[in-house]
Amino acid sequence: MEKIHLIRDWEVRKNLWREAGIPWQFVPTMGALHEGHASLIRMAAEMDGRVVVSIFVNPTQFNDPADFEKYPVSFELDCELAAESGADVIFAPSAHEIYGGHVHAEPADFGVLTKTFEAAHRPGHFDGVVAIVDRLFQVVEPKRAVFGEKDLQQIAVVKAMAVLQHPEVEVIMAPLIRDTDGLALSSRNVRLSAKGRQTALALSQSLIRVQESFKAGIGLGSAVEEARRWLQAQEGLNLAYLDVVHTNTFESQPNPTQHPCHVICAAEVEGVRLIDNIVLSKRPEPAIVS
Ligand code: AMP
């Protein structure tokens, strides 16, 4: 696996593949890789051609500077996991390399998608996401890009952006990966104490309850209300939202008649922001790692 830090070195690699008629898939990450990221890389490696994984902690998508400062960094371990999972290139540019001298994100407006839920709770977050994904797509020029269901609103925003700005890139969604106890894998989980981790489990537990009520045909409105009340009663957990939305538009769906829909939630535990979601359909359950 090749490690590339400069755009000009990436251009050389890209041109060699292009001349050889080899396509490449792309998995953008902020590093601190775990099994969730590995599953995306493995999915990309099963497609035709090569796999490029970017590692870049994007400053413009952090609405909270303290969160950026504390973001875990583990470059050498990341390279090992990426290589084992099937990556051919790690592209890890500096902020200066990727943004030029001006580390900045223009406001992004994709209607409801960039106004509600994560957008409302993290002002400027999706401006940064759109800026970096747009720039990375320009530089990397992949055939396909794989994003995780874990960041459901992010993938909806990226798809909306790509349709307009990068119609040649196919954006693929890979399933959300959980730990054996049900916690959605996240680079931020390492910042939770053992007690905080126990508290955080309430998120996936409440989502499963709502999903089961839906499958059983029990009123979704009351299941959502009950889940919210239960989460609000958890000591040490600060609920931001729990709602049912259309998977692609993020319009609230209090009485979903059309699929796909997800139950989405976000909360803070020990100062760590956690998000989770679960699909409301008869699709197979999300994968569990052991
Ligand atoms: P991040 O490094 O957190 O920006 O995430 C990079 C990519 O990995 C994004 O597309 C995420 O949605 C995805 N990802 C992160 N955690 C998980 C997970 N638990 N399951 C599936 N995909 C994930």
Image (spheres, rainbow, N blue to C red):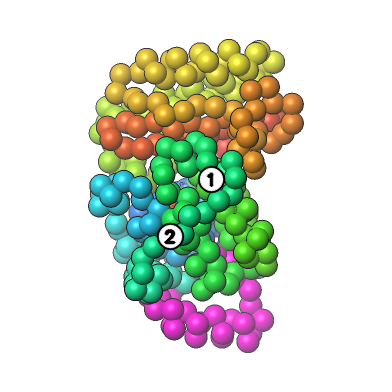
Magenta-highlighted residues? 1-26
**Vertical position of residue 228 compared to residue 201: above or below:** above
The disc, 2 or 1, on the residue closer to the chain's N-terminal end is 2
Where, quadrant-wise, is the N terminus in this rendering? bottom left
- Mark 1, secondary structure of its residue: helix
Q: What number is the disc on residue 114?
A: 1
- The image position of residue 181, as x and y in percent, is 42, 30
User: Could you say which quadrant of the image residue 42 lies in?
Assistant: bottom right
Residue 241 or 55: which is nearer the viewer?
Answer: 241
Rounded to the nearest whole Å, what is the CA distance between mark 2 and mark 1?
14 Å
Category of crowding for the residue at label 1, using alpha-carbon neighbours closer than 10 angstroms: few (below 14), some (14–19), many (at least 20): many
Residue 270 magenta: no
Please report contact status of discs 2 and 1: CB closer than 8 Å, yes or no.
Answer: no
Ligand 1 within 8 Å of the CB at mark 1: no
In the rendered image, residue 127, in percent from the top left (x then y), is placed at 46, 54
- The residue beneath circle 2 is 105
Q: Amino acid at mark 1?
A: Thr
At horizontal 64% and vertical 23% (from top left) the residue drawn is 254
Horizontal side of 233 relative to 204 (left or right) equals: left
Does residue 33 appear left or right of residue 157 in this picture?
left
Closest to the observer, 231 or 36: 231
Residue displayed at 43% across by 60% down: 105
Q: Which mark is residue 11?
A: none
For the question of whether residue 180 can be seen, the reply is no
